[in-house]
Image (cartoon, rainbow, N blue to C red):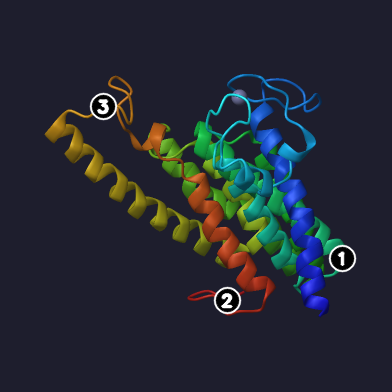
Amino acid sequence: MLTIMLVVIYGLFGLVIGSFLNVVILRRGARGIGGRSGCLSCGAPLLWFDLLPVVSWIALRGRCRSCGSRISLQYPLVEASTAVLFACIGVSDLSIPMQIVSLGIIALLVLITVYDLRHTIIPDGWSYTFAFLAFISASSFALGGGMIGIVTLLLAGPLCALPLFFLWLISRGKWMGLGDAKLALGIGFLLGPWSGLFAVFFGFVIGAVISVCILLPYSYLRARCGITRFGGSSAGFTMKSEVPFGPFLVASTLVVWFMMIYGLPIPFFNI
Ligand SMILES: [Zn+2]
């Protein structure tokens, strides 16, 4: 019974925060957070019942009430995933202060994922805030481990960022953005050195496999039929500009992190 209540409370809170995250992603660099929301196509102001997370999008069948233009599936997806992830924290055994830090970490990881998918760039401020919260979240464990625990924690972030930094360096940014290395800094702090490296490696593998699955059929189609509309004729389709690695890193980090939170064994590494 308590579990159901926690899922409902944290889930509803996640819906509200997810709705806010959508606004942050949309308006970053454009204008401030304040002001009323309007349709991106016709500018018609949104009424309060158009702003209910997930529900409004389904009720409107993903179209603007005034002009009928499509409303991105991003909105309900971000709201629903934030709700699910918040609920997963809510039912964990983490203390309340740790839960609050964890909710902040989730909000940042959702922001980073969606922004990287849309713009193939990760804002530095978000990566560093994530690294800071991850450091806070891990330091309570590290303090219990004495001097070794503290040194391990301090080294974990740079250790996980290093492989991605070198990939960025030797490819001059072609294979990997520097933003991915900055993201890996927080992953190291959050998960510790071995689980962190495992998450980075695992994210890299998923990313590489999926990139190839997207790239190969695309190159084939382009060679065969002269299709250019996916990447634009001049822009082409390169690893750097078209396939963001941030979302893969975040996905593997969330899997490893939740396994640690729920006390499940992590394959290969366990620290
Ligand atoms: Zn409209």
Which residue is at 55% across, 29% downward? 68
Number of the label disc, if any, that sits on residue 228: 3
Q: Quadrant of ligand 1?
A: top right
**Residue 153 lies in quadrant:** bottom right
Point out residue 164 in the picture as x, y percentages from the top left corner. Answer: 48, 46
Which residue corresponds to mark 1?
A: 96
Mark 2 or mark 1, whichever is nearer to me: 1
Residue 269 in the image: state x and y as whole percent: 53, 74
Q: Amino acid at mark 2?
A: Asn
Label 3 crowd bin: few (<14), some (14–19), many (20+), radius 10 Å:
some
Say whether disc 3 or disc 1 marks the residue closer to the N-terminus: 1
Residue 237 higher or lower than 156, as above or below: above
Asked whether, in this view, residue 38 is left or right of residue 265, the answer is: right
**Residue found 33% across the figure and 54% down from its top:** 209
Q: Is residue 217 left or right of residue 141?
A: left
Q: Secondary structure at mark 1?
A: helix
Tell me which label, 3 or 2, sits earlier in the chain: 3
Amino acid marked by disc 3: Thr
Dot 2: within a 10 Å radius of its alpha carbon, few (fewer than 14), some, or many (20 or more) residues? few
Name, please, the residue furthest toward the right: 97
> In terms of depth relative to the viewer, which is nearer, 241 or 219?
219
- For badge 1, the amino acid type reads Ile
Label 3 within 8 A of ligand 1 by Cβ: no
Marker count (numbered) = 3
Q: Residue at x 56, y 35 (%)?
A: 63
Using the rendered view, name the quadrant where residue 151 is placed.
Answer: bottom right
Residue plotted at (81% across, 80% down):
1
Look at the picture and state if 205 lies above or below 235: below
> Which of the two residues, 137 or 237, is positioned nearer the viewer here?
237
Residue 250 position in % (x across, y down) = 56, 53
Q: Earlier in the sequence, mark 2 or mark 1?
A: 1
